[in-house]
Image: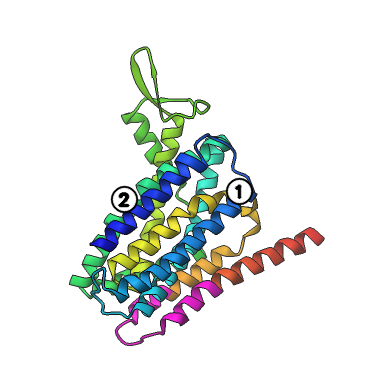
Amino acid sequence: MIAWISFSVLVTIILFFDLGILNKEPHRISSKEAGRNTLIFFVIAMLMAVGIYFIYTYQLVGNPTLISPYEASLKFVTGYFVEFALSIDNIFVIALLFGKFMVPDKFQHKILFWGIIGAVVFRLLMILFGVTLINNFTWTIYLFGGFLIFSGLKMLFEKEDIDNAETALERWINKVLVIKKDIVSGRFFVKENGRRYATTLFLVLILVEFTDLIFALDSVPAIISITPDPFIVFTSNIMAILGLRSLYFFLAAMLNKFSYLKYCLVVILVFIGVKMVLSHTVHLLEWLSLLVVIGSLVLGVIVSLMKTATKSID
C-alpha cells in the first residue's frame, strides 16, 4: 500500500508542478521547451525504474507474480516504451482534433493536462479490470493476445479512422449540452444571462478523452501482456502518459515526417499479441521483448526521416 500511496503523491506533485508553476500562464509551448520537458519526464521515468527495483527488493508492494527486483524494473521499462510507442498514434489524432476546432496553441496544454487527469482514472479502472480477468480467468490472455494481433493487422491493411465515432459523440454532446462557440476565452464553461454554457474547449476535451479511451483498448492489454502485476502495469502506463503532452508539442510540427511509424506500431502490437497467445508454451527473455519494442520504434523513426530527407533532395 505504501508504494501505491507514494506513487500517487509523486504523480500529484508532477502535475501540480507542471500546471501550477511551469504552465501557470497559457502560452505557446516551443519545440525547445517541449524537448526539454520530454527529456525531464523520461529521466523521471527511468528514476522510477530504479525505484521499482528497491520497492520490490524491500517488498513495499504486493508481488503476485513473484518476480525479482531486476525483472520488475525491466518489465517497467518495457511497459513504459510500449505505451510510449503506442501513444504516438494518439498524438496524430489529437493534432487533427486541435486543427479541426482551431484550438489556439496557448490553450492546447490546458486541454492535454486535464485530459491526462481523466486518462489516469480511466487507465486505473481498465488495468484493474484487465488484471483481474487474467488472474482469475487465465484463458482470457488468449483473447487479449488475439485482439492485439487483430488490431495490428487492421492498422496495417486499413486506414485507422475514428472520425465517425467522434462525430457521433460530438452530436450526442450537442444534444446533452448547449455548446457555446467560444475558443478564445480559454475556459471550459462560461456564464451568460445567468445561464452556464460549455465551450468549444470543453467539447474538444471530451473528444480527447474519448480518443485516449479508444487507444487504451490496445495499449492496456499490451502492457498487461508484459506482466499481470497491477503496480508495474499502472506505473509504467502512467509515467508514459505524463510525458505525452510534452511529446505532443515536441512532435506536433514534425508529424508528417514520421510516415513509417505506423508500421513499427504494427510490429509491436503483433509481436506482443503473439507473445500473449504463446505465453504458456514459449517464454521469451524480458530484455528480448524490450529490444523488439525499442528496435521497432527506432527503426520506424530512422526510415521515416530517411524518406523525408530523400524527398527533400528530390
Instruction: Give the position of the N terminus as an image quadrant.
Output: bottom left
Whole-percent x, y for residue 216 in the image: 38, 57
The residue at 56%/58% (across/down) is: 39
The spot of residue 277 in percent (x, y) is 34, 78
Q: Is residue 148 left or right of residue 41?
A: left
* Secondary structure at numbered mark 2: helix
- Which class describes the residues within 10 Å of circle 1: few (<14), some (14-19), or many (20+)? some
Where are the magenta residues, as a range? 272-295
Above or below for 117 versus 88: above
Using the numbered discs, state the Cα–Cα distance from disc 2 to disc 1 in whole angstroms: 27 Å
Residue 308: where, in percent of width, then height? Answer: 71, 61
Residue found at the very far right of the displayed protein: 314
Q: Residue 69 vs residue 307: left or right?
A: left
The residue at which mark 1 appears reads as: 33
Q: Circle 2: is it few (<14), some (14-19), or many (20+) Cα within 10 Å? A: few
> Which residue is identified by label 2?
121
